[in-house]
Image: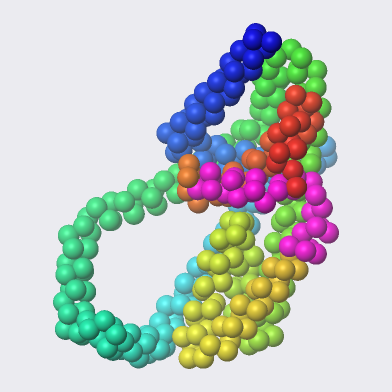
Amino acid sequence: MPETHQMKTNQFHRVILSVAATGLILWFGKSFFVPIAYALIIALVLYPLSLFFEKRGFGKTLSVVLPIVLLCLLFIGILFLLSYELVVLSAKWGQIQQQLDPLLYNLQAQLQSELGWTIENQVTWLREYLAKLSQNAGQLLSDTANVLLGALINLIIIPVYSALILIYRSKLASFLTEVLPSEFQARIPQVLKNTVGIFSKFIRGMALVYLCVGVLNSIGLWIIGVDRPFIYGMITAVMTIIPYFGIVISALLPIVFSWLETGSMLQPMLIIAVFTVVQYLEANLIFPYVVGRFVKLNTLAALVAIFLGAFFWGVAGMILFLPFFAVFRLFAEQVPELKPWSKLLSD
């Protein structure tokens, strides 16, 4: 009994050390691991399409390049929508400013009446704040340039990583099989095949869900008379990739514009009602019907994944950790030694 207890204690200590080491690696290796993680997710999604082209004689390299080109075209289309929205915003800036001026004046009056903060003091504070901001303008521009440069590098390197993962997938699978203990080696090829297949179906199903949500959003916004309903509807659908928070952030854009353009709260309330109804349909009808329960995580596991992702990698982690938890759950479900983890994460 003492030996058994000691073995369990040692195993627990190894688990704790492994988790701590993994956390440190994820924290300090963010700039390296984030593009690799995005590339791995993209490779998992594109693998069935690449296999489809390969079986029809396109050759391995071309079968990898074609899906990535199609995905890049889709990404360019989304950027076009966002750019168009910025152009529309700049064209309407004069009208928006006319709506903002009385709102700002009322805000200044309320600050003076409620808090005793005179308009002169408000103007003085604003000038001091702008002066401090201008002193840090160089650092701000430098940080902005670094962020943009990093984003540009990632936009170039992620498709390259994805292509290489797809091209060398056999070698990667063989490496994983050989480095694992011998009792796992016989099962690993089939486990990997099943996990990739199920996860690919899940991602394709999710893409269809986002498309359905975008169409329903657009129809609802069009019915209540919102300008550019298709753009707002599709952007909101795409932003739901960020769980729980994406819908809130993206919904603010049409709500604020509608309020500024109409000067009434009626249409913004109707916009909230449209998004609420569509989200209810997505959660209770569209998602279960289209996607099923391929990799369904319970709510606790999903929230832990989101907040751990935000802690380690920011917004990128919020997007990436959820599917990685789902992949791990699928993997654990098919490995008897890891079944407890699958049960813990499952809905």
Q: State the image coordinates of residue 126 (x, y, percent, origin top left).
A: 21, 74
Q: Residue at x 80, y 64 (%)?
A: 285
Q: Is residue 326 shown left or right of residue 303?
A: right
Q: Is residue 260 shown left or right of residue 201?
A: left
Residue 289 magenta: yes
Residue 80 drawn above or below residue 123: above
Q: Is residue 59 visible?
A: no
Q: Is residue 94 shown left or right of residue 23?
A: left
Q: Which residues are magenta?
A: 283-310
Picture quadrant where residue 236 is located: bottom right
Main SS type for the magenta part?
A: helix
Picture quadrant where residue 221 is located: bottom right
Q: Residue at x 51, y 91 (%)?
A: 264
Residue 318 drawn above or below residue 216: above
Q: Is residue 274 visible?
A: yes
Q: Is residue 9 shown left or right of residue 92?
A: right
Q: State the image coordinates of residue 9 (x, y, percent, origin top left).
A: 59, 18
Residue 161 drawn above or below residue 201: above
Residue 338 magenta: no
Query: Farthest top residue?
Result: 3
Q: State the image coordinates of residue 296 (x, y, percent, origin top left).
A: 74, 48
Picture quadrant where residue 109 is located: bottom left
Q: Residue at x 77, y 64 (%)?
A: 284
Give the quadrant of the N terminus: top right
